[in-house]
Image: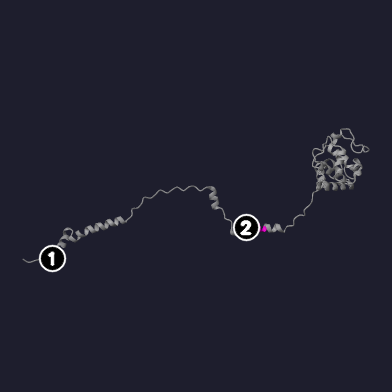
């Protein structure tokens, strides 16, 4: 009996397998390896996550939107703003400071009081109106002494009494009710100041001008205090004379006689 070589049998089996569709031994042997490789490949491929729903965006506040959208300051403008205070300090340092002035004084204060309280009736320059004139020496004739005029301005028509005379009797002035009393409205300093202003500035009395200067010195040195008021119902010429004499003017006789 003739023995068939092994390689011919192997070739015959492969041919028969190709014809009948039966797997060969080699294909059968490789099947487990292919299955294992496929399983490993599937394990390496990551699963695709399900898409998440988008998170709603919070609305932007109007002030934040305005701050984001507004125009920014240019760099050159920012530099100018930084240098501006330095320029301002330098500029102010070059300005001339006004000279320091001392206290205004009785006559200057009297000018302000006259403009505010008296000019409407007696005229801006003392020329007169609904009230008597104060300029060109007229007031000096009516009131020979400043103390008499001060009492009249403090008391007014009501203090003197309607129908009664005031000032120099030879002039014949009679209170008819048109003059208000300013004793309660003005301090003694303001009241004396306006009277001396009328006499010194409007009627050009050198005596009253000197009296105002002497009283200013006494006030500034602290020797004389005129911050109180003159009582319109009780004020007297003697009381006012005491105030005027306290300025040490040195001309007491003229204070009483003008």
Instruction: Identify the residue shown where x is 64% and y is 59%.
Output: 83
- Residue 204, image x and y in percent? 89, 47
Q: Nearer the viewer, residue 238 or 75?
A: 238
Instruction: Identify the residue shown where x is 21% and y is 60%.
Output: 30
In this rendering, is residue 226 above or below 82?
above
Residue stretch rendered in magenta on the structure: 83-87
The answer, for residue 41, to whether it is visible in the render is yes
Instruction: Identify the residue shown where x is 54% and y is 48%.
Output: 62
- Residue highlighted by disc 1: 6
Q: Which badge, 2 or 1, is on the more N-terminal residue?
A: 1
Check residue 111 in the rendering and tell me which mark sits there, or answer none.
Answer: none
- Residue 126, image x and y in percent? 86, 44
Residue farthest toward the right in the current orientation of the protein: 170
Left or right, 32 with respect to 210, comes to left
Which colour scheme appears in the figure?
A: one colour
Quadrant position of the N terminus in the picture: bottom left
- Residue highlighted by disc 2: 82
At mark 2, the secondary structure is helix
- Residue 42, image x and y in percent? 29, 55
Quadrant position of the C terminus in the picture: top right
- Residue 20, image x and y in percent? 16, 58
Which of the two discs, 2 and 1, sits closer to the camera?
A: 2
Disc 2 from disc 1: Cα separation: 104 Å
């Amino acid at each position: 009996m003739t023995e068939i070589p092994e390689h011919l049998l192997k070739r015959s089996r492969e041919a028969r397998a190709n014809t009948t569709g039966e797997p060969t031994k080699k294909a059968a042997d490789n099947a487990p390896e292919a299955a294992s490789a496929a399983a490993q490949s599937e394990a390496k491929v990551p699963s695709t996550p399900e898409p998440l729903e988008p998170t709603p965006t919070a609305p932007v506040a109007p002030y934040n939107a305005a701050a984001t959208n507004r125009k920014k300051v240019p760099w050159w403008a920012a530099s100018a703003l930084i240098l501006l205070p330095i320029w301002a300090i330098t500029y102010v340092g070059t300005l001339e400071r006004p000279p320091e002035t001392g206290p205004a004084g009785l006559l200057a204060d009297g000018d302000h009081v006259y403009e505010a309280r008296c000019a409407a009736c007696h005229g801006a320059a003392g020329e007169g109106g609904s009230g008597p004139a104060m300029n060109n020496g007229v007031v000096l004739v009516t009131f020979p002494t400043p103390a008499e005029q001060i009492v009249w301005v403090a008391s007014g028509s009501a203090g003197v009494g309607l129908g009664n005379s005031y000032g120099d009797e030879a002039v014949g002035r009679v209170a008819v009710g048109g003059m208000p009393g300013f004793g309660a409205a003005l301090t003694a300093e303001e009241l004396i100041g306006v009277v001396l202003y009328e006499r010194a500035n409007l009627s050009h009395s050198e005596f009253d001008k000197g009296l105002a200067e002497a009283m200013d010195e006494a006030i500034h040195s602290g020797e004389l205090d005129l911050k109180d008021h003159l009582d319109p119902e009780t004020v007297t010429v003697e009381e006012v004379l005491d105030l005027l004499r306290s300025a040490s003017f040195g001309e007491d006789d003229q204070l009483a006689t003008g």
